[in-house]
Amino acid sequence: MVREQYLTATEGTHVERPDNQCVYNIGIYGWRKRCLYLFVLLLLIVLVVNFALTIWILKVMWFSPVGMGHLHVRSDGLRLEGESEFLFPLYAKEIHSRMDSSLLLQSTQNVTVNARNSDGKVTGRLKVGPKMVDIQSPKFKVLSAHGKPLFTADEKEVTIGTDRLRVTGPEGALFEHSVETPLVRADPFPDLRLESPTRSLSMDAPKGINIKAHAGKIEALSQMDILLQSSEGMSIVS
């Protein structure tokens, strides 16, 4: 270090100060200066490359003020145009298509729709697989366009709300338990056949049972007795 000497002299006395022997230049010179310029140049190149990549990503992903590509962000939700593929579960409150097109859900394995409560437990499930459609719910209901129940099923009973139930299979309909209906009839030409191969067949009604054949005969066959019984009134066979 250079030490400066301060001399105090009386007035009229001329004292010569000693000259400084060392001179220091302030700044960066030599190889340090070249390294600094190289670092600044590399930093500028990195900034330009990052900016170019950002512009390229925005262009490729179709970013816009309203969304990204076919996905538009709106005040009432999201709107997705065209076909989309989801690799993970999709959670949504409502999914609907446009007014002029239908909604198509497609999968190579199965399509599963789950309804959960506030605790996250599944309360209802609809699973469409390659061989079976599985529905799990405490109650299943099918409504008409006007809101009329057409089909209702739960653990206790199955209710059909239409005016007519038609079975077109060649083997008819098989019921393991009782059936409650006001009318059973066949088409105009085929015969109506009620049978129980291994057990008994009974028909009960609170007001009466009418069996009519307008263009044929009535035939009753049994391995044991045929019983006609009326709690009030008479049993008429004509």
Image: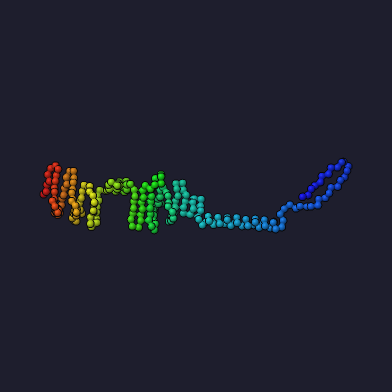
Residue 207 image point, x, y percent: 17, 43
Tell me what residue is drawn at x 42 percent, y 52 percent. 89
Q: Which of 63 and 13 is in front in this view?
A: 13
Residue 169 image point, x, y percent: 24, 56
Tell me what residue is drawn at x 45 percent, y 48 percent. 77
Residue 213 image point, x, y percent: 15, 52
Residue positioned most to the left: 238
Q: From the viewer's perspective, is 199 left or right of 26?
A: left
Q: From the viewer's perspective, is 219 left or right of 168?
A: left
Tell me what residue is drawn at x 11 percent, y 49 percent. 238
Q: Nearer the viewer, residue 66 or 208?
A: 208
Residue positioned most to the right: 12
Q: From the viewer's perspective, is 227 left or right of 30?
A: left
Residue 168 image point, x, y percent: 24, 55
Q: From the viewer's perspective, is 70 left or right of 164?
A: right
Asked whether the viewer can see residue 152, the reply is: no
Tell me what residue is drawn at x 66 percent, y 58 percent. 38
Asked whether the viewer can see residue 16, the reply is: yes
